[in-house]
Image (cartoon, helix red, strand yellow):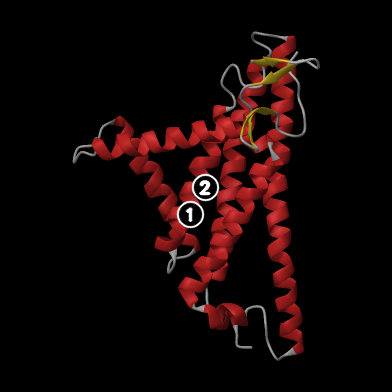
Amino acid sequence: MAMVELAAETLFRIGSFPVTNTLTEIVIVDALIIAGIVLLNKNIKKIPGAFQNLVEIVVDGFYGLTESISPKSAMSIFPYFMSLFVFILLANWLSLFPGFGTVGLKSKEGIIAFLRAGGSDINFTLALAIIATIATQVLAIKTIGIKHHLARYFSFNPIFLFVGLLEILSIFTNVVSLSFRLFGNIFAGDVVLTTISQMFAFILPLPFMALEIIVGLVQALVFAMLTMAFMAILTTPHNEGGEH
């Protein structure tokens, strides 16, 4: 039987670098996104086909959503928002294909799966949350300037200084909440689907798979929208809400 471990399993090493089954899935996701971009760029037409039409509808809808949250910074925030959503969604949905978590290498303990959901690896979700947080801080500095950005956290007024320190603390809590929310939901779904698929090959896994399609969509949307909301807040000059 396939093993369901908390940590991602190492398939092989390149020197001292471990290549895990979750990393393998992420590489496939990257390749699919790059292939999709290349395909779209080569086939852009004035009268769009089905694929181009779908992409335009999704992009237009998500840009409208970004603009409704942050009208002034929508152009800057949207690429991050859309990229995170597409990347996480593909990583979540790709893991629902047959063979994920069930086909792999034999070991003494069982089978080490060749492929596993990237979101079921805390290293992946934590790295994603850290990247999103750093991108948010960098975007804020580029948009409003370092002086206005630091004014959000530091002040000569003791009350505002205390509030600023709480905001600094919230940066770290946001990293934890973003990473563990995504990890917890995807890992739990991975365990359930792997277990059910090994016990029942047909029919019974289908309702669980349908549920995981929804969970994968919701978690991608939640992660991307929370990042977008943080960006919208931090790209708004602090003095627009009141002077220190």
Q: Which residue is mark 1?
A: 80
Point out the residue furthest to the right here. 109
Indicate left or right for 85 with 100 as reference: left
Which part of the image, by quadrant, shows the C terminus? bottom right
Quadrant assignment for the N terminus: top right
Kind of residue at disc 1: Tyr
Above or below residue 36? Residue 97 is above
Q: Which residue is mark 2?
A: 84
Q: Position of residue 105 (x, y in %)?
A: 67, 16
Q: Residue at image x 68%, y 48%?
A: 179
Do callouts 2 and 1 mark residues in contact (Cβ within 8 Å)?
yes
Going by the numbered disc 2, the residue's amino acid type is Leu
Q: Judging from the image, what secondary structure is the residue with disc 2 in?
A: helix
Q: Secondary structure at mark 1?
A: helix
Pointer 1: residues within 10 angstroms few (<14), some, or many (20+)?
some
The numbered disc on residue 20 is none
Residue 40 in the image, given as x and y percentages of width and height: 30, 37
How many numbered circles are shown?
Answer: 2
Q: Residue furthest front?
A: 15
Is 64 or 192 nearer to us in this picture? 192
Decide if residue 130 is in sight here. Answer: yes
Examine the rendered structure and indicate whether residue 199 appears above or below residue 230: above
The location of residue 196, given as percent across then percent down, is 73, 16
User: What residue is rendered at 37% in x and 35% in y?
Assistant: 36
Separation (CA) of disc 2 from disc 1 = 6 Å
